[in-house]
Image (tube, grey):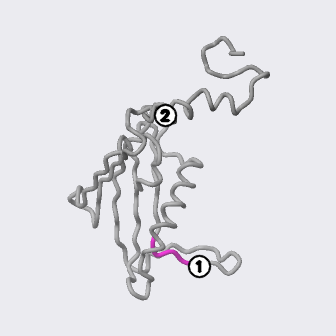
């Protein structure tokens, strides 16, 4: 039985499976058209451009659909390495670190800019781990690199845009 508010939620007599089956999942499988109008085998358009900012060591703009980010790279001397407390034999220094910024305007919200939340920490760690996997070791490339990714628009998967 419906809740009467038009939310699509079933009363306690219904199950979660029924709710999902009557909502998004059923619409996608039956019509083969996603809520944003794309067909099931159609991907969002991807665009990437390097060197978008004039006075940085490196910069890029990347977008996939309505999700977009501007990334900058700043180089520093080896002395600027980020020092870490060694935990269980882990690293004591970081030569490459990534800051992930997700301001409220990226999802058309009004809010305080400057604070750090769980999304920024988690998505930043995920993106940093991916970049670190292909980054040269300090013996090969001794410079310190700070990457900053500012999400300018988000319609999902913003950590992958970074």
Residue at horizontal 42%, vertical 34%?
Answer: 33
Q: Whole-Å distance between the Cαs marked 1 and 2?
A: 36 Å
The quadrant where residue 80 appears: bottom left
Residue at horizontal 67%, vertical 81%?
Answer: 89
Q: Percent from the top left, x then y, of residue 98?
A: 46, 63
Label placed on residue 157? none
Q: Percent from the top left, x then y, of residue 24?
A: 55, 31
The quadrant where residue 71 appears: bottom left
Q: Quadrant of the C terminus?
A: bottom left
Bounds of the magenta segment? 91-96
Label placed on residue 92? 1
Front residue of 14/73: it is 14
Placement of 138 over or under 71, stated as above or below: below
Placement of 19 over or under 123, stated as above or below: above
Secondary structure beneath disc 1?
Answer: loop
Q: Is residue 13 left or right of residue 70?
A: right
Please tell me whether residue 100 belongs to the stretch shown in magenta.
Answer: no
Placement of 142 over or under 154, stated as above or below: below
Residue at horizontal 34%, vertical 66%?
Answer: 74
Badges 1 and 2: C-beta atoms under 8 Å apart? no
Residue extending farthest top? 4
First in sequence, mark 1 or 2: give its number. 1
Label placed on residue 111? 2
Residue extending farthest front? 30
CA neighbours of label 2 inside 10 A, class few (<14), some (14 to 19), many (20+) = few
Residue extending farthest left? 54
Please tell me whether residue 92 belongs to the stretch shown in magenta.
Answer: yes
Front residue of 93/122: it is 122
Q: Percent from the top left, x then y, of residue 101?
A: 45, 50
Q: Is residue 56 left or right of residue 21?
A: left
């Amino acid at each position: 039985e419906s809740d009467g508010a038009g939310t699509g939620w079933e009363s306690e007599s219904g199950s979660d499976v029924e709710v999902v089956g009557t909502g998004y999942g059923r619409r996608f499988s039956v019509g083969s058209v996603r809520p944003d109008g794309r067909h099931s085998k159609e991907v969002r358009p991807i665009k990437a451009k390097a060197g978008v900012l004039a006075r940085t060591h490196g910069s890029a703009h990347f977008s996939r659909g309505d999700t977009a980010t501007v990334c900058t790279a700043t180089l520093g001397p080896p002395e600027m390495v980020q020092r870490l407390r060694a935990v269980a034999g882990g690293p004591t220094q970081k030569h490459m670190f990534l800051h992930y910024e997700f301001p409220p305007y990226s999802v058309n919200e009004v809010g305080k800019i400057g604070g750090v939340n769980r999304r920024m920490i988690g998505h930043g760690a995920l993106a940093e781990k991916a970049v670190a996997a292909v980054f040269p070791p300090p013996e090969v490339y001794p410079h310190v690199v700070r990457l900053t990714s500012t999400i300018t628009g988000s319609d999902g998967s913003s950590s992958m845009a970074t």
